[in-house]
Amino acid sequence: MLLAMIEPYYGASFQPGSSELFKSFRSAIGKDIEELIVAKGFNLKGPYSSFDDMIYDDKKRSDIIIQIEMTPEFSAVQGQWKSRYNPLVAGNYTYTYSGKVSLVGKISLTGIEPMTNQKIWSKSVQIPSIEDIVIETTGKYTRPLQGADVYEDPGIYNAVGKALSAQYAGIMNKVAAQINAEEFLSMQAEIKELKAKKGY
């Protein structure tokens, strides 16, 4: 079988996805899933940045396209920005953040028949819950940071990155358990039928 793969992407609701930390996490997951698919005995095309980036011939030749949507979520956020008077900076105040956060979420794996764009396989893997990550900014800022910018601070980047690293092997083991060669091979008749409906 020939599988194709779309680069992993974050769910639209996950704002920190554009930060360097989570770009690196997404890239690592993508590379390891590529290796995993090849290790399971499949040929692999891609990864493509999106379904639309696949050329017609690749869609025609591929049996299944694998899409990976990651939806991490920060929960149980405790902490706040604190201001401190500093006459040497514009605005006269600097801001620092300290607190705790927990990370939960899931990774959704979807298999699509390329010619009909029909979903034929779907699995969901829970990201092992990472509780009470202590986060503290090392920089002093002239305003509280918003959205993804918070995760660019070295103190927060390192704390969340360390927590993700600790759970990484567990996440990949769960993904590996869901990608089953026999299950994919058993779908060949359905794939052939779908391709035939398109007249190819």
Image (cartoon, rainbow, N blue to C red):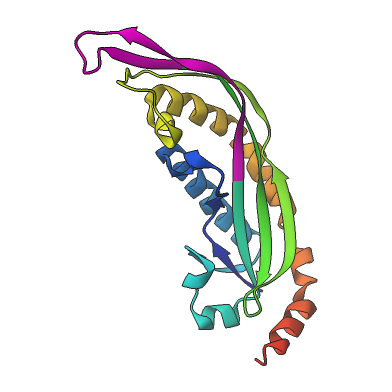
Q: Is residue 169 visible?
A: yes
Decide whether the magenta segment is chiefly helix, strand or loop: strand
At x 67% / y 92%, what residue is drawn? 199
Total marks in image: 0
From this view, report whether residue 198 is shown above or below residue 84. Answer: below
Q: Is residue 190 above or below residue 23?
A: below
Asked if 140 appears above or below 87 in the picture, the reply is below
Q: Is residue 159 left or right of residue 108?
A: left
Front residue of 149 and 193: 149
Q: What segment is highlighted magenta in the picture?
A: 71-97
Q: Is residue 131 above or below residue 41?
A: above
Residue 84 figure quarter: top left
Q: In the image, is residue 146 part of the stretch drawn in magenta?
A: no
Residue farthest to the bottom? 199
Quarter assignment of residue 152? top left
Figure quadrant of the C terminus: bottom right
Q: Position of residue 183 (x, y in %)?
A: 78, 64
**Picture residue at 61% right of the left edge, 36% below the top:** 73
